[in-house]
Image (spheres, rainbow, N blue to C red):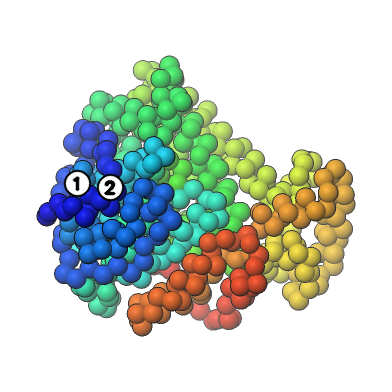
Amino acid sequence: MTENQTIIQAGWNFDNSYSRLPDSFYTKLDPTPVRDPQLIILNEPLAASLGLNIQALQSDDGVAVFAGNQIPKGAEPLAQAYAGHQFGHFTMLGDGRALLLGEQIAPSGERFDIQLKGSGRTPYSRGGDGRAALGPMLREYIISEAMHALGIPTTRSLAVVTTGESIIRETDLPGAILTRVAASHVRVGTFQYAARWGTAEDLKALADYSLQRHFPDVADAPDRYLSLLREVIKRQAELIAKWQLVGFIHGVMNTDNMAISGETIDYGPCAFMDTYDPATVFSSIDIHGRYAYGNQPYIAAWNLARFAESLLPLLHDDEEQAVKLAEEAISEFSGLYHRHWLAGMRGKLGIMNEEPEDQSLVGDLLSMMQQYRADYTNTFRALTFDQLEGTDLFCSKDFTEWHERWQARLGRQSESKESSHQLMKNSNPALIPRNHRVEEALEAAVEEGDYSVMEQLLDVLASPCAHSPEQAEYAILPPLSDQPYRTFCGT
């Protein structure tokens, strides 16, 4: 590994606070070099916001950094250790195919993890090859950037490079490495790891670190560890509500896939719901529907309870009192989530104040959408623009009665119709990354080396509430199929 003047000029500005935690939390090692890295896509707006020189990143030396073939000055590559409940079963985990390159300090002063995903084997690989295939890395790029455009807290994708090497899954696939940007990669599973295998000092060090990095306003509070729990609960309640409001299904909500920062992390078998149905599952491995769309708020609460358990030694010296404090904090999640979700639903219906009837108004609409197998995104889009025709839902007597109630509800608020309409436009995206469109882009990229389909998709997803003519074709539903859509972890 070499350091190079071009790399220095790229604007890397590392200060690696995670590496100053006890060394039980990570293993320092370099990425495994690859044969022939080629830059596939670079997120230029994100790069600029990080203070990076786009031209330098596109150079051979810049691409070598994204591939793990060169280490920029100031980076300290490491694989993070963590644990997690995977489908309810607790196990030791860790970065099996990823390395934290370092923490970039942006011109804004914000700190961001720069992680290489697919960069080779680590001590936590558990028999895996540590590599990643091009398709899943491009999927993460597309979905994470779409989530960002939708205003949902998320890790982001800076670049994808191919490696010039094949990886073996069911078939030979082109290898790739994704560069992921995150507020941090501290997970609920990181705390579970510390609580199970670390010392009391390790757990305290992780908690203090997390407070300083993500919740500095309460870092010095007398009850700071209880505040840490409550702040994480607040952020997760808001995050999951935003998922539900756009029909996003994470697919694998294990505790190691819940970041305490409140960002969406680890895009594997994720997808967006077409037909509204709370039981919707896309992941091929979620055979019992544990992580179905309608279960996501409940699983978030379950995961947070595991987080609270890991914090018990810090909450109070008396275990019984610590449990009581944790239970009281966790009990707040449901109400917080519901308030965020209902406020979002009011926005989707153009409602700008609160009335007790709103809950039933929303609930009745969703029940009808499920009964008539209505498309989730397009139904709200049609309501926004009063295009109420052409579906079984809109032709039903049930909907006609509901529509009268909705119009009467809008008539009871003092805001103008124009304000209400604008609220709906801002709350209801014209399009989402439809699963068939994502697959179309990935097939063109992986099978044909044609990245134009993906680039066009990314362009229209960048402003989801623009409601532009160019977006109309991307709102068209997929052809009917006898086979349910399935996604895979891509490991």
Write the residue at 40% across / 52% down: 48
- How many C-alpha atoms fall within 10 Å of the one at disc 2: few (<14), some, or many (≥20)? many
Is 46 displayed left or right of 77 in the figure?
right
Q: Quadrant of residue 204?
A: top left
Q: Quadrant of the C terminus?
A: bottom left
Evaluate if marks 2 and 1 touch, with contact meaning CB atoms under 8 Å apart.
yes
Q: Which of the pair 304/64 is nearer the observer?
A: 64
Residue 174 locus on image (x, y percent): 27, 74
Disc 2 designates what residue? 12
Image vertical order of residue 196 relative to residue 469, above or below: above
Image vertical order of residue 432 relative to residue 436, above or below: above
* Residue 106 visible, this orientation: yes
Q: Which of the pair 316/190 is nearer the observer?
A: 190
Residue 175 locus on image (x, y percent): 26, 70
Q: Secondary structure at mark 2?
A: loop
Write the residue at 77% across / 69% down: 387
Write the residue at 25% across / 77% down: 172
- Residue 182 shows which numbered tag? none
Q: Quadrant of the N terminus?
A: bottom left
Q: Earlier in the sequence, mark 2 or mark 1?
A: 2
Q: Amino acid at mark 2?
A: Trp
Disc 1 designates what residue? 73
Q: Quadrant of residue 454?
A: bottom left
